[in-house]
């Protein structure tokens, strides 16, 4: 049986330090939590930068340099740098960290969408939760722009000879799988492709088992046996969707970028705690976690 790749997305750009004391919001905290997550079993570390002066999302190389050096020195985990940045950044800004630091993997967002935290994603929240405020925040939201031209640019910059990175193809809805099939036909990407079904963002496909099955069936039809797949369940859906995906033969993603919780009403203490939990669920299911080197083979990384 194929081993399961565990990605841990350490901080992202959605959650703010005011939402949880556990969220790492400066480069040093991000490095420390990433290293702990790797030691807890994370195979891939999905990384965004943060500005140590204010905790805001950052693309400044100075905010990545020491962080990446520590992670690379203290773990063998696969480094995956976001090209999604935050939804307020332009595509050139979003590309800067990956083109500067040439990671083995980077994210590749496969289509545009309205992008908000679904109020229901935080339904486990017994803390600071105000439905009215949550709905206002959700409907303010924003557009996460990923045109075909943007996709082509990321493919050319990061997939070409200069970096030869493997993409984590973030697919927020069924149409994004078709966008990817269209791009593949034009020779933009090499098999095996690594799909990340992103479920539960308000603006994308909801985190429901029936939708997961449909995403998987659509991927089977479009990509045959030349792909690997994984799931993000946003917010409260994180662990249930990960467990369901693993039971269907998929890989999983956890981390405080995607959910601040560990269980109903309880904030996670760290990224490592979420990794420990999913590793234990995987073991109970009879699944084995892939080491970084095993994942490098499964995904055909440059190594
Ligand atoms: N924030 C996640 C919903 C990226 O960094 O490129 C998807 C993500 C995108 O991780
Ligand atoms: Zn991300």
Image (tube, rainbow, N blue to C red):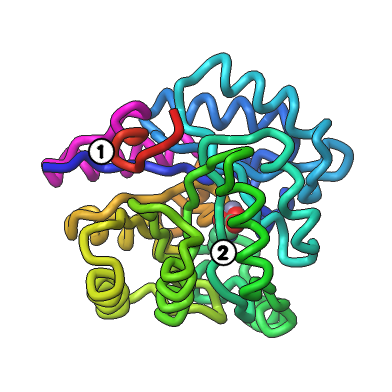
Q: Label 1, label 2: how many angstroms apart (C-alpha)?
A: 30 Å
Q: x%, y% of residue 275? A: 39, 38
Q: Is the magenta stretch mostly helix, strand or loop?
A: helix
Is 93 left, or right, of 241 in this rendering?
right
As for residue 286 lying within the magenta part, the answer is: yes
**Residue 285 vertical placement versus 40 (above, below):** below
- Numbered-mark total: 2
Q: Element type at marker 1?
A: helix
Mark 1 residue crowding within 10 angstroms, few (<14) / some (14–19) / many (20+): some
The residue singled out by tag 1 in the image is 280
Q: Can residue 82 be seen in this view?
A: yes
Task: Give the quadrant of the C terminus.
Answer: top left
**Residue 18 vertical placement versus 140 (above, below):** above
Q: Element type at marker 2?
A: strand
Q: Which residue is drawn at 55% across and 53% down?
A: 107
Q: x%, y% of residue 222? A: 30, 73
Is 240 left, or right, of 236 in this rendering?
left
- In this view, the residue in front, 69 or 280, is 69
The residue stretch that appears in magenta: 270-294
N-term mark: 1 or 2: 2
Mark 2 residue crowding within 10 angstroms, few (<14) / some (14–19) / many (20+): many
Residue with the most extreme right position = 53
- In this view, the residue in front, 90 or 230, is 90
Q: In which quarter of the image is residue 46?
A: top right
Q: Residue at x 72, y 48 (%)?
A: 17
Q: Are marks 1 and 2 in contact (CB under 8 Å)?
A: no
The residue singled out by tag 2 in the image is 109
């Amino acid at each position: 049986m194929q081993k399961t790749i565990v990605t841990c997305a350490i901080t992202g750009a959605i959650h703010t330090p005011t939402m949880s004391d556990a969220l790492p919001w400066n480069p040093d905290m991000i490095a420390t939590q990433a290293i702990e997550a790797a030691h807890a079993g994370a195979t891939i570390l999905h990384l965004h930068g943060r500005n140590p002066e204010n905790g805001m999302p950052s693309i400044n190389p100075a905010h990545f340099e020491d962080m990446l050096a520590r992670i690379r020195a203290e773990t063998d985990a696969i480094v995956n740098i976001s090209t999604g940045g935050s939804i307020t950044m332009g595509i050139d800004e979003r590309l800067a960290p990956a083109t500067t630091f040439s990671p083995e993997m980077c994210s590749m967002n496969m289509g545009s969408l309205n992008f908000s935290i679904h109020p229901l994603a935080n339904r486990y929240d017994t803390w600071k939760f105000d439905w009215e405020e949550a709905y206002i925040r959700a409907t303010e939201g924003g557009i996460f722009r990923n045109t075909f031209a943007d996709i082509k640019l990321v493919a050319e910059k990061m997939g070409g000879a200069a970096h030869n990175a493997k993409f984590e193809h973030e697919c927020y809805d069924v149409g994004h799988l078709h966008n990817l099939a269209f791009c593949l036909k034009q020779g933009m990407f090499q098999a095996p492709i690594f799909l990340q079904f992103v479920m539960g963002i308000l603006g994308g496909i909801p985190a429901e088992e029936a939708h997961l099955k449909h995403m998987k069936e659509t991927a089977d039809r479009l990509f045959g046996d030349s792909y690997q797949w994984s799931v993000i369940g946003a917010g409260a859906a994180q662990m249930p969707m990960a467990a369901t995906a693993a039971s269907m033969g998929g890989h999983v993603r956890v981390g405080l970028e995607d959910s601040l919780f560990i269980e109903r009403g309880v904030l996670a203490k760290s990224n490592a705690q979420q990794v420990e939990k999913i590793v234990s669920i995987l073991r109970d299911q009879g699944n084995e976690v892939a080491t970084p080197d095993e994942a490098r083979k499964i995904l055909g990384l440059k190594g």
